[in-house]
Amino acid sequence: MEKPFKRDIYFSFFMFTADLRPNDEAYTRILIRHLQALAEMGYTGFDLHIATGPAGVDHRTEVDDYVRLKRAFDHAGFRDTRFTTNVGTTRTFDPTSPYEEQRRQALAYLKSRVDITLVLGGEDTIMSGPFLYPYGVFPLTDSGDQIWSDALQDWLKPRYAAASSPFKELAEYAREKKVKLAIEPVKNWETPGTTMVSDALDFLDTYDIPMCGVTIDTAQVVMESQGPAIFKDNIARAVRKSQLNYIHISAPDRGAVTDSWIPWDIMLGEIEPVYTGPYLVEVFNAIPPFDSSMRMTRRRFWRPGEDEAETGRDSAYDVARSGLKTLEDKLAAFGRSPSR
């Protein structure tokens, strides 16, 4: 009898922080307590956001900082645990810049993030995130008005063309390091581009960058998509070129996955037959900087060991535990089993 396929389910540390503070030993102990609690629930890996760092920082120093953080994780019993990363580009580190020097700076920054991803997760791990166009940087006209619709698409076209050369070099660098790249489209009130899976796939097709892939995020697809038919086509497009690199399970309000408006049958019906990588349960807690950047109005989930316990309200661990159970149940309905 054939054994059931074992599925890895990871958890995103966006529940707790946007900055791992790798040089802060006290905070590292807090991170380790979270890792221990989540591993006990049954999560088999974790996604960690790599903060930008101060202006002028030496990227080699940053990599060394994460070597020390990973050493602390190893000593705490997580040597063989899988880690992926979330990375974004910025106004300073902008691979779409019209200025060559700025594109070179962005490439060096992104290469350092590949190095950090390799340090934390080892070979065949994944660097995902909005690392094509700078996150949250909205273009303006000379008169200070924001640019939208057709004008925005026309404005973005030469930016993507400018990014093609550094992205080819980045993709080759990641291939040599055995790190998978996965561009993640992000909804339009967070960033003006890339906002749809089609955008990311079009960029990779237009400029012939097959060694880079995409992330499918359920929240982004529900809020910023062209419908089930295009979703089905995008999954097929990505699979044909081995570019379906990561799946994020996230509620449209970026809160609890349980009892959320995720169209499970439509999405898993397309993804499950063709995807063998890990799933990430991704919850953005209503903490800085997410509360403002993502326009959050809901209350936060209190974080054990960091926040004062709040009677009658879900903790971060409650939400993580129920999210894991929900995803396990949905996968079981498609005949797949978790990896524990």
Image (tube, helix red, strand yellow):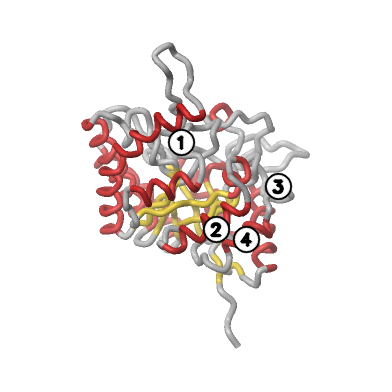
Q: Is residue 221 left or right of residue 102?
A: right
Q: Which mark is residue 193?
A: 1
Is residue 37 in view from this perspective? no
Residue 10 versus residue 112 in the image, above or below: below
Q: Which mark is residue 279?
A: 2
Q: Amino acid at mark 3?
A: Trp
CA gap between label 2 and label 3 equals 18 Å
Q: Residues within 10 Å of mark 1 (few under 14, many from 20)?
A: many
**Foreground label between 2 and 4:** 4
CA gap between label 1 and label 4 equals 26 Å
Please report the residue visible at 49 percent of the width from the left and 49 percent of the height from the top: 32
CA gap between label 4 and label 3 equals 14 Å
Q: Earlier in the sequence, mark 2 or mark 4?
A: 4
According to the image, label 3 marks what residue?
261
Q: Amino acid at mark 1?
A: Gly
**Foreground label between 2 and 3:** 3
Residue 45 rendering spot, x and y as whole percentages? 50, 58
Please report the residue visible at 47 percent of the width from the left and 16 percent of the height from the top: 145
According to the image, label 4 marks what residue?
268
Q: Residues within 10 Å of mark 3 (few under 14, many from 20)?
A: some
Q: Quadrant of the N terminus?
A: bottom right
Q: Is residue 59 left or right of residue 249?
A: left
Please report the residue visible at 69 percent of the width from the left and 63 percent of the height from the top: 329
Residue 236 rendering spot, x and y as whole percentages? 51, 61
Residue at the limit of the structure toward the bottom, as seen here: 1
Label 4's element? helix
